[in-house]
Image (spheres, rainbow, N blue to C red):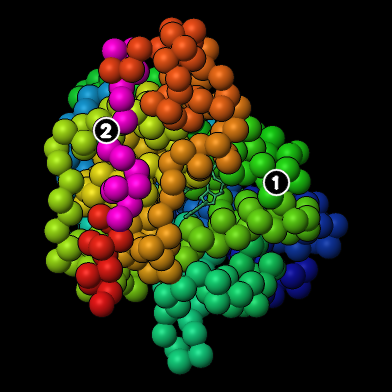
Amino acid sequence: VDFKSPGGRKQDWAHLRVCWRLEVYQPTFLRHFKAHRIKCVVHRMNEHRAICWLRRDLRLSDSAPLAEATQSGFKTAVVFIWDEDILKRIQDPDNRRVTFIFKSLQEIDEKLKSHGSRLLVRRGKPYEEIPKLAKLMGASLVVWGEDYDPAAIQRDLTTTAALQAARVESRSVKDIVVFHKDEIQNESGRPFKVYSPYARRWKSMFLAERDAADHTVTPHSFIREKDLPSDTERPSLHSLGFNEAKLWLEPGENAANRRLAEFDRQIEDYERARDFPAAHKTSHLSVDFRFGTLSIRAAVRTCLVRKSAGADKWLNELIWRDFYQQILQNFPYVTEKPFQTQYENVRYPGVEEHWEKWRDGLTGYPLVDAAMRCLNKTGYMHNRLRMIVAAFLTKDLLIDYRRGEAWFAKQLLDYELASNNGGWQWAASVGCDPQPYFRIFNPILQSKKFDGEGAFIKEWIPELKELPDGEIHFPAGASEMELLAAGVELGATYPKPCVDHFTQRDHAISLLKGVNL
Ligand SMILES: Cc1cc2nc3c(=O)[nH]c(=O)nc-3n(C[C@H](O)[C@H](O)[C@H](O)COP(=O)(O)OP(=O)(O)OC[C@H]3O[C@@H](n4cnc5c(N)ncnc54)[C@H](O)[C@@H]3O)c2cc1C
């Protein structure tokens, strides 16, 4: 666009040019130009095009990568690649996470359509597909959100190299955490290994207008559908080799925003009720943070607005998430071995039969079994229950935490490498800032404390629902009369305990104590 003053003098009004690109202002400008007799000549030129490659940021609002692309004046195409390297490792055709992603993408496509654009979806290897699309569309920039999973880091390096070879700029921006890798360090410039001082530093470094700012996306910057490559290759769920799985919560950005709004209404209860699985007082937003259907900054802004004990407690949980992400970034070996490497050679003596009982919810400890049945059926488990079942597997059944970690990775809808690994290592007392090895959860006391009336147990093990509240936590301790009256036959309608907690507790302490001597 050239702007000329009344005398015919050509002006180099760089600022005006930038504003002109933000098309919404154009009618106002035109009126203004007419009034001041400024001549404005619009030349057609090739627009600058960018690709925003979505991965774990499946939303259109408050998205750092989308804002980066659209606010830099680029016409932007939004792209998702079904990564063959990931798909081929998923054996279950009813995988819940694939359905969650698929449906969230459908919603994004609908939203883009309402802005006159579309979501481009391909299947293949991102480091081949992304450069191919960039070439096809004449895009000079590709933007994506940082991902700290070691496999993702490798994939992104390969894609960056492929784009470089094609002379296309690539930019990765922070989006899934508030602070990353080296933004929060201790006095000696090293990463924190303990949560509490990390959280204190996190809070002292935090600046709302910088760290929780809304990364506004300018929708009129999306490339129009007619200017996008044809999307006849868009894969269906079936062609990807998957069936539609039943999800326990609704996928997509709209549903995530509704969940946040609903939780916001009861955030005051969070501090008091968060540990009671049957109360359903946690946010259930972990899956949204996992796939980016909700921005972590939007969640933090909610805490800032509320300024209550409940909101502060919830902020602490969000900081736990950042904490484990920075552990994964700074100590990537944790994916293979314990954070505390002296535990690397511990040989867990647990047996296969016990593993199967734990996995299938048949240990004879009702809260453990109810939690595992809930996980297997829905893909979700409450945080307190995750701690209880993880402690039970590692300390009562003496089975390597890595087996439990892998089972959770398979089943959880919100599976997050950093948090899952951190949680398992914490429970097994081998991680950073771990549960001390000699402090061992008693599964019966935990059950009495956090599911006092057995509401959660009754929901998942209805065959125990007639037992009195006092006995439901450990049916093997009930009298024959009580069992008979409740219609429970141990070993037939519900299993006998597979181990004795107190015996196993001593074994666990001596196993781990040996390393600590
Ligand atoms: C053994 C074990 C495995 C776990 N595996 C995962 C996992 O794969 N994915 C996952 O997102 N969380 C994991 N967690 C953490 C936690 O259990 C879940 O984040 C939480 O239960 C999700 O429910 P919510 O969204 O209602 O949580 P809320 O109580 O509402 O918490 C809000 C958010 O804070 C974060 N958060 C809460 N607790 C933790 C924590 N201990 N560590 C890290 N972040 C936390 C989550 O993003 C969560 O959504 C694990 C914990 C343990 C003990």
Residue named by callout 1: 272
| Residue 242 position within the rendered picture, expressed as x and y whole percent measured from the top left | 25, 24
Residue sitting at 23 percent across and 24 percent down? Answer: 93
Q: CA distance from mark 1 to mark 2?
A: 33 Å
| Residue 227 position within the rendered picture, expressed as x and y whole percent measured from the top left | 40, 39
Q: Quadrant of residue 281?
A: top right
Q: Which element carries disc 2, helix, strand or loop?
A: loop
Residue type, numbered disc 1:
Arg
Residue 302 in the figure: left or right of residue 67: right
Q: Is residue 286 above or below residue 72?
A: above
Image quadrant for the C terminus?
Answer: bottom left
Residue sitting at 42 percent across and 15 percent down? Answer: 480
Magenta stretch contains residue 290: no
Image quadrant for the N terminus?
Answer: bottom right
Residue sitting at 50 percent across and 33 percent down? Answer: 252
Residue 419 in the figure: left or right of residue 85: right
Residue sitting at 30 percent across and 55 percent down? Answer: 506
Q: Which element carries disc 1, helix, strand or loop?
A: helix
Magenta stretch contains residue 503: yes
